[in-house]
Amino acid sequence: CYPSIPFLPKIFSDYEFTNIKCSCFDESFCSFEYCFLKSVNRTYKYGSLKVTLHQGPADKIKANFAIYKRLNGYKPFLYNVTVDACKFIDHPSSSPVMAYIFQLFSPFSNINHSCPFDNVIVDKVSIAHMNKQLTKILPFPKGEYGIFSNWYIYGEMRASVNVYGSLT
Ligand SMILES: *[C@@H]1O[C@H](CO)[C@@H](O)[C@H](O)[C@H]1NC(C)=O
Ligand SMILES: *[C@@H]1O[C@H](CO)[C@@H](O)[C@H](O)[C@H]1NC(C)=O
Ligand SMILES: *[C@@H]1O[C@H](CO)[C@@H](O)[C@H](O)[C@H]1NC(C)=O
């Protein structure tokens, strides 16, 4: 079960994706097959990505997520959490903040299972879903935000995924 975080009441209206950037730092270890945002029409916009690990299924994975706000460049805004991904996936209540971030995309992904992992697909995370999750509890003021993540596998930073968006 996913615990909720006691946030302030909501004070804004809409979340919009603006960009997504995926990087693998060692192409012999991993690669992104795709990573994009797509606008189908005014109301239906989504993000998808697929990453493959080339050296077999991994079970030593650390996920580091942080939320940034754009001022002069993106500055740390709220949270910078790191979890052992294999422990977290089996016990989401161990990190309410990560559970909150995780639910933004996990229903659209193939990662809601125990370790190991050899590929990750996130398929068509819609703005509508993000909006629903974010506006439920997010206390953020208007502005441009980044949800950045770094992925450490077997002790080394192998990949990052940065999602940019704005609250209007
Ligand atoms: C936008 O596209 C989606 C998916 O194709 C469709 O279900 C929806 O009706 C469209 N909305 C508008 C306003 O055209
Ligand atoms: C993950 O899977 C469990 C068990 O199937 C389910 O109860 C939970 O709601 C899922 N979590 C998310 C965030 O999709
Ligand atoms: C979290 O903070 C550390 C230390 O400042 C930084 O190196 C790391 O890049 C931050 N994480 C993210 C996802 O930005």
Image (cartoon, rainbow, N blue to C red):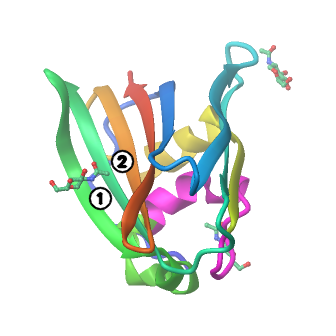
Residue 68 lies, in percent from the top left, at 26, 40
**Mark 1 CB in 8 Å range of ligand 2?**
no
Residue 140 in view of the camera: no
- Ligand 1 sits in quadrant: top right
Indicate yes or no whether the magenta region holds residue 120.
Answer: no
Residue 28 lies, in percent from the top left, at 58, 53
Question: Marks 1 and 2: in contact by CB < 8 Å?
Answer: yes
Q: In front here: 62 or 29? A: 29
Amino acid type of disc 2? Leu
Residue 63 lies, in percent from the top left, at 42, 65
Residue 166 lies, in percent from the top left, at 39, 25
Q: Quadrant of residue 29?
A: bottom right
* Dot 1 crowding, Cα within 10 Å, few <14, some 14–19, many 20+: few
- Under circle 1, the secondary element is loop
Residue 80 in view of the camera: yes
Q: In front here: 166 or 75? A: 75
Query: Vertically, is 61 above or below 121?
Result: below
Quadrant position of the C terminus in the picture: top left
Q: Quadrant of residue 52?
A: bottom right
Amino acid type of disc 1? Phe
Q: Residue at x 29, y 64 (%)?
A: 81
Which numbered tag is attached to residue 138?
Answer: 2
Q: In front here: 87 or 11? A: 87
Residue that carries the numbered disc 1 in the rendered image: 7
* Dot 2 crowding, Cα within 10 Å, few <14, some 14–19, many 20+: some
Please give left or right for residue 164 compared with residue 127 in the image.
left
Give the magenta-colored segment's residue range.
99-117
